[in-house]
């Protein structure tokens, strides 16, 4: 398995904790720098194309981790599925007290077994993203996956996609901290552009 991530030139310092943590836990990884495309959405939209490139480049399964994350504990890789299906994180919340339960696919960590069917899904994700360049990558991925009624994804426990403001109260075993720096810097970044 290879951990993969990309970052834009304005994220050079932000990606360092992730890369250092991957080296600390001796995880094989590939990281690639891209030119800044000008908007946060366009920079996020690189993700399916980068994953597509890595599926062709490497003959192994892939674990995508967002550039503004950090591995804080040895990953229990034995939880990764062996049936060839993807594993993603689903964030669940209620809109208001006793409101409807909302489930949102989060693309901050994705396990992609390297097989023909997942390549087909990623190819469709790329096409859909290309047709919707300003749409958030996790929304375009959700829309593609929703077309496959018989394809059931696996879900990561919250400790693999730990976001402090959502999960602190549950006190989980934390493996990957998602710092969400992009959310904090998104408005500032776009003002600078």
Image (cartoon, rainbow, N blue to C red):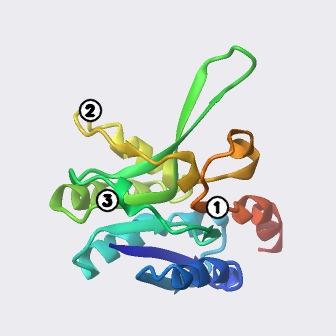
User: Looking at the rendering, which quadrant does residue 144 occupy?
Assistant: top left
Report if the CB atoms under discs 2 and 1 are less than 8 Å apart. Answer: no
The spot of residue 146 in percent (x, y) is: 35, 37
Could you say whether the residue bearing mark 2 is in a helix, strand or loop?
A: loop
Measure the alpha-carbon separation of dots 3 and 1. Answer: 25 Å
Q: Which residue is located at x 44 percent, y 79 percent?
A: 27
Could you say whether the residue bearing mark 1 is in a helix, strand or loop?
A: strand
State left or right for residue 12 relative to residue 50.
right
Measure the alpha-carbon separation of dots 2 and 1. Answer: 31 Å
Going from the N terminus, do you reach mark 3 or mark 1 first? 3
Residue under label 3, please give it: 122
User: Looking at the rendering, which quadrant does residue 148 occupy?
Assistant: top left
Q: Nearer the viewer, mark 2 or mark 1?
A: 1
Going from the N terminus, do you reach mark 2 or mark 3 first? 3
Q: Which residue is located at x 56 percent, y 57 percent?
A: 134
Report if the CB atoms under discs 2 and 3 are less than 8 Å apart. Answer: no
Instruction: Using the image, determine if residue 61 lies above or below residue 56.
Output: above
State left or right for residue 38 relative to residue 192.
left
Instruction: Using the image, determine if residue 173 lies above or below residue 5.
Output: above
Residue under label 1, please give it: 177
Mark on residue 149? 2
Instruction: Using the image, determine if residue 107 lies above or below residue 31.
Output: above
State left or right for residue 6 relative to residue 187.
left
Residue 142 vs residue 164, the one in the foreground: 164
The spot of residue 156 in percent (x, y) is: 46, 48
User: Looking at the rendering, which quadrant does residue 2 occupy?
Assistant: bottom left
The spot of residue 175 in percent (x, y) is: 57, 61
Residue 187 vs residue 92, the one in the foreground: 92
Q: Which residue is located at x 56 percent, y 66 percent?
A: 66
């Amino acid at each position: 398995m290879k951990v993969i991530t990309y970052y834009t030139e304005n994220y050079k310092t932000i990606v360092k904790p992730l890369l250092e943590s991957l080296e600390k836990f001796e995880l094989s990884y590939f990281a690639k720098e891209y030119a800044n495309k000008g908007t946060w959405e366009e920079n996020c939209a690189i993700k399916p194309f980068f994953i597509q490139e890595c599926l062709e480049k490497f003959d192994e399964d892939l674990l995508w981790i967002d550039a503004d994350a950090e591995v804080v504990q040895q990953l229990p890789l034995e939880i990764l599925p062996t049936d060839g299906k993807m594993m993603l994180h689903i964030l669940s919340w209620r809109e208001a007290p006793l409101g409807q339960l909302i489930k949102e696919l989060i693309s901050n960590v994705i396990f992609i077994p390297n097989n023909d069917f997942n390549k087909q899904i990623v190819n469709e994700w790329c096409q859909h993203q290309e047709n919707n360049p300003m749409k958030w990558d996790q929304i375009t991925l959700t829309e593609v996956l929703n077309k496959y009624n018989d394809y059931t994804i696996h879900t990561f426990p919250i400790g693999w996609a730990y976001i402090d403001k959502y999960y602190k109260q549950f006190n989980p075993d934390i493996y990957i901290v998602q710092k969400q720096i992009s959310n904090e810097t998104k408005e500032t970044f776009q003002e600078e552009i």
